[in-house]
Amino acid sequence: MSTEKSLPVHAPMGQFATDGDELIVGGLPLTRLAERVGKTPFYAYDRGVIRKRVSALRAALPEQVKLHYAMKANPMPAVVGFMVGQVDGIDVASGGELKVALDAGAPIGEVSFAGPGKRSEELRQAVAAGVLINVESFREVSELARCSEEVGVPARVAARVNPDFELKGSGMRMGGGPKQFGVDAEEVPALLREIGKHGLAFEGFHLFAGSQNLKAEAICEAQQKSFDLAVRLADAAPCSPRVINLGGGFGIPYFPGDLPLNLAPIGDNLAHLVERARHAFPKADLVIELGRYLVGEAGVYVARVVDRKVSRGQVFLVVDGGLNHHLSASGNFGQVLRKNYPAAIGNRMATLDTESASVVGPLCTPLDLLADRMVLPMAEVGDLFVLFQSGAYGATASPQRFLGHPEVLEVLVG
Ligand SMILES: *Cc1c(COP(=O)(O)O)cnc(C)c1O
């Protein structure tokens, strides 16, 4: 087959070993893991890969910085349970996530709840649970005042600030300019007065500028500016902050040309901020909250080839799951231009005979494309197609009911 129409190749994904033709996931050859799981498609998340990522982060960042897991990246209860033992706290974004975090034994003092449009019952649950609520509007403050009175404990709150700057080079902007997240920095002094007036337990600030950033300098700049902003806003606070949450935004490489994030300058920058915090906020902890960076590289999506077709010279491998399970790999979750995720045929890792193939799911839409003209080992029906970098924003960020195919399985392995 011709490969001249193929699109660029990815850097090799080093987090999973191979043994001959088999990719090793969670200590098992993929074919055997698929037998163990019992059916395809499935996501497998590898504890060992997550553990390594957390240790690398801890080694690079000052020990005073607390590490939180933003569980919307991967809310599988077993993953959240495992993360509770790996990180210092869990960030939730709904009442549903709050339940999973509490079930998993997350330490109440280090659970925080962010997100626009928190419903009254979610706010009440959070007050009763005693977790920190990142308030994102004036309405939330008055609702929380009422909840506090009715539940009988003052709500623990931090002000989520929509900063007056943006995170440069970020895949998804979550702050700066007009946004539905947080309260505009210029209105935060008034918000803090309301928090004080109602006697809520003010604990600090939460700033989150954006997601999926691979540029260390941009992340450092955002963290520095966030810290400066917290210093400016703290004058109007009812008491000295106990927590400054600088958000996350650490990206992982997905596409040809992407390079892994360089942690060293981020560690240096945070060490500098820890030093400044000792003077500016003697009672406060610095927190970073990461989702994708902690779990994204630890996951693979595995689908079985159910058909192999050639249409006017182009090979199509049709697999048993697609955008219904893995919306982001299809390019329809926030990407501007569709690019291929790193992929492999997980039971032909050593096969040298390659071809250009497009891998598609079973849905009746041309959007259901998992790999566009990629160089892959020649695959047959029954083979296992693998998408790497699939541990974050996968199963729960996909329209699983679309077209009524079976839901995807998830396993935590290793
Ligand atoms: C989604 C989210 C995160 C995690 O973002 P990642 O890019 O996955 O690290 C952190 N904080 C808040 C408030 C979020 O909404």
Image (spheres, helix red, strand yellow):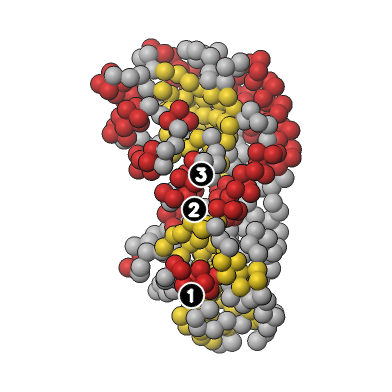
Separation (CA) of disc 1 from disc 3:
29 Å
Quadrant where the C terminus is found in the figure: bottom right
Residue kind at label 2, given as amino acid type:
Tyr
Task: Identify which amino acid the numbered label 1 is placed on.
Answer: Arg
Instruction: Tell me if residue 169 can be seen.
Output: no
Q: Residue at x 58, y 50 (%)?
A: 50
Instruction: Find residue 248 and report its horizontal and vertical position in percent.
Output: 58, 39
Measured as percent of width and height from the top left, residue 339 is found at 60, 63
Look at label 3 and name its amino acid.
Met
Beta carbon at label 2 within 8 Å of ligand 1: yes
Q: Give the x, y percent position of residue 297.
A: 59, 55
What label sits on residue 244 in the rendered view? Answer: none
Between the C-alphas of marks 2 and 1, the distance is 21 Å
Q: Is residue 231 visible?
A: yes
> Residue 404 location, x and y as percent?
32, 68
Question: What residue is at 41 percent from the left and 49 percent from the top?
Answer: 77
The one nearer the camera, 156 or 298, is: 298
Q: Quadrant of residue 128?
A: top left
Q: Is residue 67 left or right of residue 179?
A: right
Tag on residue 393? 2
| Residue at numbered disc 1 | 304
Label 2 or label 3, whichever lies nearer to me, is 3
Q: Nearer the viewer, residue 108 or 404?
A: 108
Specify whether tag 3 is near ligand 1 (CB below 8 Å). Answer: no
Question: Image quadrant of residue 356?
Answer: bottom right
Q: Could you tell whether 276 is left or right of 179 in the image?
A: right
Q: CA distance from mark 2 to mark 3?
A: 16 Å
Mark 2 or 1, nearer chain start? 1
Which label sits in the foreground, 2 or 1?
Answer: 1
Q: Which residue is mark 3?
A: 83
Q: Residue at x 63, y 49 (%)?
A: 52
